[in-house]
Image: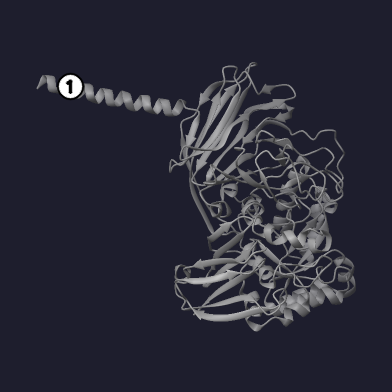
Amino acid sequence: MKKMFIHRSLSLLLSAMLFVLTNCKAQNELSLKSKDNLNKISLSLTQDGKLSYKVTRRDKAIILDSPLGLRFENDDFTAGLSVVKNSAIGEKREKYELKVSNNKIADHVFKTKSITFKNKLGALMTIDLIAGEQGVAFRYKFDNNGKQTQVLKNEITGFHIDQNAKGWLQPYNKAGDYTPGYEDFYVNVKSGDPISGARNESVGWCMPALFNVNDTKNWVLIAESGTDGSFPGCHFEPDSAAGIYKIAFAKGDEKFTLPLAEKANAYPESNLPWVMPWRVIIIGDKAGDILLSTLITDLAPASKIEDTSWIVPGKAAWSWWSHPDDFTPEIYNKFTDVSASFGFRYTLFDAGWEKANKEGKIIDHALSKGVQPLVWGYSAEYFDPVKRKKRFKELAEMGVKGVKIDFWCSDRQEIMGTLQSVFEDAAKEHLLVNLHGTTMPRGWHRTWPNFVTAEAILGTESYFYEPKFPEKAAEQNTVLPFTRNVAGPADYTPFALTFRKYTRLNTAVHELAMAMIYTSGIIHFADSEEVFNSLPNELKNLLKEMPATWDKTECVIAEPGKAIILSRKKDTLSYIIGINGTNAATPVSIDLTKYSKGFSKFRIISEGSDPLMDFKIETYPVTAKWQYNLAPKGGFIIEFVK
């Protein structure tokens, strides 16, 4: 009995020791796994104290060994580092509702860890890690206080993509009259390829950047989140010959449209403490996982607006597309009437609206029709904080509901800070914000829900300006939902049937479907009153009912550059929308019963006798084996009906 008691006690003691050792090892490891154990980020130090990381999914490489580190004006964290503190693994939950989204509710659990390093001079740098089911992220942080401004000369952070991998990347345009504005084509490249196919001279690659990795078994999107006034927007250096995409800061000459001094270098500057933006790595087994990810907003600060009931997504008519040189009260009022007749919540008055309002009181006309006016403005008018607050107050008192602020064309730190102040000051006057000629969103629509949409996209206006756009538009339309639109709401200004300078090649249904493929807090429809009024009644009803945000979205087919088909639901409305990004007919087969709960029939809108201008509308019983041929550069819209 005594021997048995001793044996049992030893077993318990050994088990306890093993538990402690296992937990100590887990705590001391410079790595972190998601709760589902699929995604992992691992840090490592060389003997000379150089820091690197790698990312895996199911133990397969997603990001190969890549450099980490920062070099300040007076301090260096690129070598000679040692670990001084390694926190226990924590857990946090991010549950919130987005005003503009693919899925109304985001709810994700993350594992967290913070590791503090000391350099040769004894200065401390912390790296926060986070891992969830949609990917991983990290950021640099300096907790100690310091009155002296710190200047960051170089961030050596890289993202090493296997050179067999292919991706979709957008060139980062050199500063010019309207650049950088994230209005270039996404080009299909192999990892490490030089910049090619750019519309303008370029100095790097943009984020988000999409790659198909791990022998095409996984997709990864590299992005930023949480950038505020303490950091510039970042892109990748142009030289990625080894497949290592390194962080580059905004350039000092990015100031054409704004009252900024030109600098030789626009280095990040801040006093301590200093929390830098998240470097985000979204991972999916399918491209559709990337499209539906909310990791960028999960990492952004929570909403700073307590009461958001006044922020309502909606649709707007917009005169500029069909009447770019007509700034008369009559034309603005005509498009307000279009909004009223289709039940659109908003109407957009573009450049020149101030004179028209003095002459014809176009704002009063909109309000009398129950339509809320949105007005255009020039970025320089909103740069100075005193003038900005005064202007916002004036607009709100006039009855304006939102502002479209144009021509930012810079990623400099000053602009990042100004944009946060724009969102905040606009919110105080209950004004919505739409940015144009602007930087890429970085999860800001969670922090400031009144930020409802932004350009930063090569959209429909390119039929006026870009000769290559008609041929490339369909392909781009099947890439941007997996790249640009993941970063934030996108103001593509869809549905432009009227031919402009460069003739459209996409079918009419493709163009209409774009309004339901992209996610934007306000859908600004681009075309004339005559086109709207000529539509069949079924299409008019579709435009009246079409939501500007969604409760639930599923990817049915997700092939960047080729085809995209989405199931979209809002309240009692249910749709399936598809577009073809290629010049070849594409057969698809869908089990409609999977998406049609509560419905017995479906109405399909497809190409009519003249595919570029006409629609065909047919109704059928729901079937489990629906087969369809997507027309070249074509599309379809399925509306489930009772």
- In the image: residue 489, left or right of residue 638: right
Q: Mark 1: which secondary structure?
A: helix
How is the rendered protein coloured? one colour
Residue 356 in the image, given as x and y percentages of width and height: 88, 70
How many C-alpha atoms fall within 10 Å of the one at disc 1: few (<14), some, or many (≥20)?
A: few
Say which residue label 1 marks.
7
Quarter location, residue 273: top right
Q: Residue at x 74, y 67 (%)?
A: 505
Identity, as a three-letter code, of the amino acid under mark 1: His
The image shows residue 515, relative to residue 617, as above or below, that is: above
Q: Residue at x 64, y 46 (%)?
A: 167
Q: Is residue 36 visible?
A: yes
Q: Nearer the viewer, residue 562 or 284?
A: 562
Front residue (pair 13, 447): 13
The percent coordinates of residue 222 (x first, y second) are 62, 43
Above or below: residue 502 compared with residue 172: below
Image side of residue 632 versus residue 102, left or right = right
